Amino acid sequence: MAIVAIVDDRVTNRNIFSKLAASIGPDIEVHSFGNPREALDWLAANPADLVVTDYKMPEMNGADFVRALRTTQGASDIPVVVITVYEERSYRLRALEAGATDFLNSPVDHHEFITRTRNLLTLRRHQKLLAERADTLAQELADSERSRERAIRDSIERLAQVIDTLPVLINAVDREGRTLFVNAFETDFFGVDPAAAVGRPLAELIGKVNAERNQTLDQLVFTTGRALPAFEENLTSADERRRSFLTTKTPLRDHTGAVTGVLTSSLDITAHKRTEEHLRYLAHHDPLTGLPNRTLLSEKLRGSIARARRGDKIFALHLIDLDGFKAVNDVYGHSVGDRFLQAIGARLREVVRERDTLARLGGDEFAILQSDVATNYDVAEFSARICEAIAAFVDPETPQMKSTASIGVAIHPNDGADPEELLRNADMAMYKAKGEGGNAYCLFAADMQA
């Protein structure tokens, strides 16, 4: 049974995150808290396997919550995911310094939430298994001095067998960086002889670049005596395969409590990373044309607005609607219509500059974010070129289809202070151009709202 604690002052978020966590598997037990102090009290008596917390909360922010949790006995190595709406690095740095393990941006993508929490719970399960095996070894050593040597030998063999079956890179090093243990999965990955691995410098096993990074992090564990938060890294195998791993480093102690080594475990998350990237792409791109969709366009608009405020820049939003496309689509069929839309998208790519953003909003509607505009004349000239390009365009694969475009233009900052207002006003201007016969462009004017 894996225990997941959700901490968020908003009931809706708690309910959503709790359901997502519970959907990971039947062995997940979820506890949610609206108050971070209540969560700390509960966690002091009930160690969790994963904690998911919001950053912005009334009584205590996410960084302070993580810092307080890390001082709780038995909670120093519990994975903690911080959900934040802030994109500034300073907020992430505060949470990292406090001991956060991972981050999720708000609003949270459900697939990303499940993937990341599942990875951390898997890694936590492996850590607990190793700890349990170590405890078993300690108990067996204490049971009988007479059978001490046999107990050690049997326990080590069983532990090695368990560790060798895990699909995780596992090694342990001493203060001099010499290898104390390395499992079969890691020796196979780096192409080294398991029999000759123990006692050798780690650099000889995993390569100089990987070893230098590991030595720096290992030294931090020796210095602080604390486990490091899980982090992602890329490693290259002996056959030149580059893979992504989620890695943790935990101190190994002798009977006096002194740190004598560092245990490193790395879970291969390459498939999950590719899934995340694919889902992120699907969430921001139109599947028919491969162009940015409305969601990504809105993000680009927000970024342009922020840059415009800092640098007094002007930009324009061109909303493009193909004239009469529905009737043509009905005559020739949707497959031909889809091919024509793809061709129009490709033609518009040739018109826009590299720094501009071309998007498909749905149906026969496209949009172009024109950056760094000097004058309204530049905007009008650009819209005219778009009209001419579409009117003159003939796709060799669908030569029977021709179209013109009606274009509405909204210019920031005069025609809108946020993406929604810019899109709304550009839409009004586009309908005015269409109402005047199409194959034309129209710049938004305030009297259109009357």
Image (cartoon, rainbow, N blue to C red):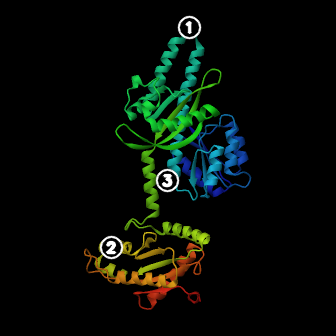
Q: Are marks 3 and 2 in contact (CB under 8 Å)?
A: no
| In this rendering, position of residue 72 left or right of residue 293 | right
Query: Which tag, 1 or 3, sits closer to the chain's start?
Result: 3
Q: Does dot 3 land on a helix, a strand or a loop?
A: helix
* Residue kind at label 1, given as amino acid type: Arg
The residue singled out by tag 1 in the image is 146
Q: Would you say residue 121 is visible in this rendering?
A: yes
Q: Does dot 1 land on a helix, a strand or a loop?
A: loop
Residue 212 location (% of width, % of height):
50, 36
* Residue at (63% x, 32% y) in the render: 223
* Residue at (25% x, 75% y) in the render: 396
Q: Are marks 1 and 2 in contact (CB under 8 Å)?
A: no
- Which label lies toward us, 1 or 2? 2
Q: Nearer the viewer, residue 266 or 351?
A: 351
The residue singled out by tag 3 in the image is 111
Query: Where 147 falls versus 374 (above or below)?
Result: above
The residue singled out by tag 2 in the image is 343
Q: Nearer the viewer, residue 159 or 215?
A: 215
Q: Would you say residue 6 is visible in this rendering?
A: no
* Residue kind at label 3, given as amino acid type: His
**Real-space CA distance between mark 1 and mark 3, rounded to the nearest whole angstrom:** 54 Å
Query: Which tag, 3 or 2, sits closer to the chain's start?
Result: 3
